[in-house]
């Protein structure tokens, strides 16, 4: 799976692409340099949309919205994905399967979470783009703008874990 890439152009030479790829089975990451016309093997992944239901110790249960089947998932596979789950369990997770085996869980790109704890704004800090710490309902801690207060809902980008805007 491509994690990041960079297209490099040099004067009087053919361009190439530096690619950081992650092995979907082992989780290992390596750097590749791909020249023009070079081919890579594609992997056939299947995707399924799921919603978090509940946790039971070391197992987390996700529900298939189409069939209402519950699927148990080990805590090590879930990782930090549940830091983007709100109290209403509205977050949709994409399960990625390779040959029927679950290899990755990703939350939807943007989620809306409520601020449950943050410092009050300090007078004078609002003139510049100062940030302050905030704790969200899921336990995630992020940096937010100074005008965000407890009880506000904020949009978070799950790819970077950063504040996007107040909702």
Image (cartoon, helix red, strand yellow):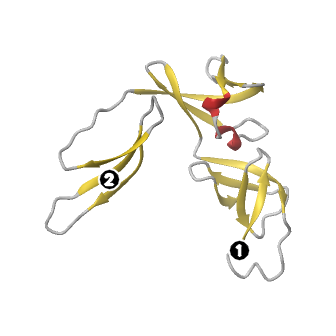
Q: Residues within 10 Å of mark 1 (few under 14, many from 20)?
A: some
- Where does the image place residue 63, in percent across and percent down from the top left? 67, 23
Q: CA distance from mark 1 to mark 2?
A: 35 Å
In the rendering, which numbered label is found on residue 130?
Answer: 1
Identify the element where label 1 is drawn. loop
Query: Would residue 70 be found to the left or right of residue 121 on screen?
Result: left
Q: Residue at x 37, y 27 (%)?
A: 44
In the rendering, which numbered label is found on residue 72?
Answer: none
In the image, which is nearer the foreground, mark 1 or mark 2?
2
Residue denoted by label 2: 18
- Where does the image place residue 110, in percent across and percent down from the top left? 61, 48
Residue 54: which quarter of the image?
A: top right
165 lies above or below 158: below
- Determine the residue located farthest toward the left in the rendered image: 12
Residue situated in front as seen by the camera: 160 or 21: 21
Q: Residue at x 57, y 46 (%)?
A: 109
Residue situated in front as seen by the camera: 59 or 126: 59
């Amino acid at each position: 799976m491509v994690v990041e890439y960079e297209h490099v152009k040099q004067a009087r030479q053919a361009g190439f692409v530096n690619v950081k790829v992650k092995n979907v089975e082992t989780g290992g990451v390596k750097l590749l340099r791909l020249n023009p016309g070079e081919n890579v093997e594609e992997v056939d992944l299947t995707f399924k949309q799921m919603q978090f239901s509940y946790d039971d110790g070391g197992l987390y249960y996700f529900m298939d919205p189409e069939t209402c089947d519950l699927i148990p998932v080990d805590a090590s596979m879930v990782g930090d994905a549940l830091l983007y789950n709100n109290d209403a369990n509205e977050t949709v997770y994409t399960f990625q399967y390779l040959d029927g085996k679950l290899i990755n869980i990703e939350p939807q790109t943007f989620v809306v979470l409520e601020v449950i704890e943050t410092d009050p704004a300090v007078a004078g800090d609002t003139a510049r783009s100062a940030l302050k710490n905030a704790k969200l309902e899921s336990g995630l801690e992020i940096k937010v703008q100074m005008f965000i207060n407890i009880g506000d809902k904020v949009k978070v980008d799950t790819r970077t874990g950063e504040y996007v805007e107040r909702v």
